[in-house]
Amino acid sequence: MNKRLVYGACFSIALAIILGAFGAHALRKLTSSEEILRGFQTGVDYHLFHSGAFLVLGLWGTRWIDHPKARIALLFLVLGVALFSGSLYVLTACRVWGCSYAWVGPITPIGGTLLILGWTWLGYTLVKGERPN
């Protein structure tokens, strides 16, 4: 077990639940726009799904996580979640509170691309049998 990854995943899951509750209750009071609410919920969904995956990866074992190719996949995934979900959270905040958000738009697809690369890299690494025994 990789304790640091497990702890980080559990913290991230708790944060996703808090943000999901915020979206379901407080955010609904701040906006009636279904588009804004859906965008925020998409960020929460991806955040929670990937945090659960990080927990599984952390429980899987330290020898696998210490493999250089697995670390690359994990880096892509962590950055992907931060950029994808994080940009959706910032975009929501800017749309609700009226700040400029044009700069946020390009960040979301970069995060999505990193998620795709991370899962693809992880799958390739596992299929090629490069996971330490």
Image (cartoon, helix red, strand yellow):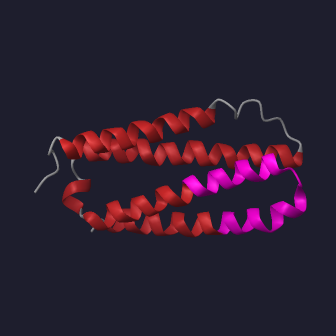
Left or right, residue 86 beside residue 77: right
Q: Is residue 101 above or below residue 19?
A: above
Quarter of the image with the N terminus in it: bottom left
Q: Is residue 94 above or below residue 29?
A: above
Magenta stretch holds residue 36: yes
Could you tell me which residue is drawn at 62 percent across and 34 percent down?
Answer: 107
Furthest-left residue in this view: 133
Measuring from the top left, give residue 77's x and y in whole percent. Answer: 43, 46
Magenta stretch holds residue 24: yes
Quarter of the image where one finds residue 41: bottom right
Q: Nearer the viewer, residue 3 or 17?
A: 17
Furthest-front residue in this view: 34
Could you tell me which residue is drawn at 77 percent across and 30 percent down?
Answer: 102
Measuring from the top left, give residue 74's x and y in whole percent. Answer: 37, 48
Left or right, residue 35 beside residue 69: right
Quarter of the image with the C terminus in it: bottom left
For the image, the number of numbered tags is: 0
The dominant secondary structure in magenta is helix
Quarter of the image where one finds residue 17: bottom right
* Residue range corresponding to the magenta coloring: 18-46
Measuring from the top left, give residue 36's x and y in whole percent. Answer: 79, 48
Could you tell me which residue is drawn at 74 percent across and 43 percent down?
Answer: 91
Q: Is residue 25 above or below residue 50?
A: below
Left or right, residue 42 beside residue 64: right
Measuring from the top left, give residue 79's x and y in whole percent. Answer: 48, 44
